[in-house]
């Protein structure tokens, strides 16, 4: 399950490797890759509901799940409520934790809201992350729903055997923040740090990543 703004091909090395021993199914989330666009802004829950329908349509019976970044948000929300639908969970570069907002952040949000009221086009061009600015209007609304949902309480409900893999140099979801927090919330989870890797550690060093997940899936 790929990250936000990405697509199933991001897991190319894992699909090729795991296909030798497993049936591998790699979907594009709605709005990304080859999937149809959204017709309304979805939050994490909307994607979790879609994933259940996809799994039923694809006849996936209690599969292992590998999820990256945004994909991990969807997996966490799904398995907190329907843990029996899957077996083991592998999260890499997992996102879903809302950090305390700094005063600078709050001031910028307030400024954005004031400017948007009178100059909406200017506000959309000059505020928000680069990732956000590249999105079409409907996807921007979806993005805001997704990044503003804190999944700590959901993570604490997961009972599936879970492996967390983070890149040592990941600045998007740092292991000493997201990784350690998820590790403390998900009972019995394991945390592995991949040296000299960033947010896409599974494609930066696929040999090591594949070795780690093979040991976990074989255990």
Image (cartoon, grey):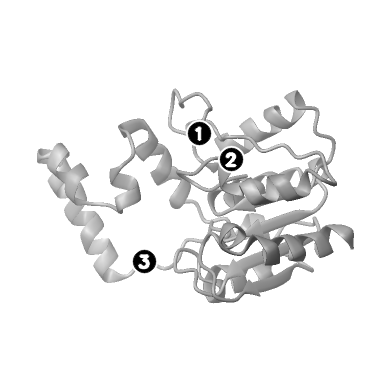
Q: Is residue 79 left or right of residue 37?
A: right
Residues at badges 1 and 2 in contact (C-beta under 8 Å)? Answer: yes
Residue 150 % position (x, y): 52, 56
Q: Is residue 137 left or right of residue 41?
A: left
Image-quadrant location for residue 163: bottom right
Along the line of sight, the residue nearer the viewer: 107 or 198 = 198
In the image, farthest residue toward the left? 118
How many angstroms separate mark 3 from mark 2 (CA)?
Answer: 32 Å
- Check disc 3 and report its element: helix, strand or loop: loop
Q: Is residue 113 left or right of residue 183?
A: left
- Check disc 1 and report its element: helix, strand or loop: loop
Residue at left 46%, top 25%? 37
On residue 101, which mark appears? Answer: 3
Residues at badges 3 and 2 in contact (C-beta under 8 Å)? Answer: no
Residue at left 84%, top 35%? 61
Image height of 168 relative to 121, above or below? below
Residue at left 69%, top 71%? 191
How many angstroms separate mark 1 from mark 2 (CA)?
Answer: 7 Å
The residue that mark 2 highlights is 8
Image-quadrant location for residue 56: top right
How many angstroms separate mark 1 from mark 3 (CA)?
Answer: 32 Å
Graded by Cα atoms within 10 Å as few (under 14), some (14 to 19) or many (20 or more), the crowding at tag 1 reads some
The residue that mark 1 highlights is 33
Image height of 123 relative to 200, above or below? above
Image height of 5 relative to 108, above or below? above
Q: Earlier in the sequence, mark 1 or mark 2?
A: 2
Residue 104 % position (x, y): 25, 68
Image-quadrant location for residue 139: top left
On residue 67, which mark appears? Answer: none
- Check disc 2 and report its element: helix, strand or loop: helix
Quarter of the C terminus within the rendering: bottom right
């Amino acid at each position: 399950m790929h990250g936000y703004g990405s697509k199933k091909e991001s897991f190319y090395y894992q699909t090729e490797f795991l296909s030798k021993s497993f049936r591998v199914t790699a979907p594009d989330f709605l709005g990304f890759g080859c999937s149809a666009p959204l017709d309304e802004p979805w939050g994490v829950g909307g994607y979790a509901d879609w994933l259940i329908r996809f799994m039923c349509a694809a006849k996936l019976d209690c599969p292992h799940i590998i999820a990256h970044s945004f994909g991990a948000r969807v997996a966490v929300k799904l398995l907190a409520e329907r843990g029996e639908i899957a077996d083991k969970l592998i999260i890499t570069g997992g996102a879903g934790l809302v950090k305390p907002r700094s005063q600078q952040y709050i001031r910028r949000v307030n400024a954005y809201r004031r400017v948007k009221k009178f100059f909406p086009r200017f506000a959309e061009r000059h505020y928000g992350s680069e990732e956000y600015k590249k999105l079409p209007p409907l996807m921007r609304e979806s993005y805001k729903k997704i990044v503003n949902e804190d999944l700590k309480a959901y993570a604490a409900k997961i009972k599936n055997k879970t492996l967390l893999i983070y890149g040592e140099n990941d600045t998007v979801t740092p292991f000493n923040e997201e990784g350690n927090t998820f590790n403390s919330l998900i009972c019995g989870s394991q945390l592995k740090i991949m040296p000299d890797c960033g947010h896409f550690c599974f494609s930066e060093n696929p040999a090591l990543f594949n070795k780690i997940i093979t040991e976990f899936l074989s255990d």
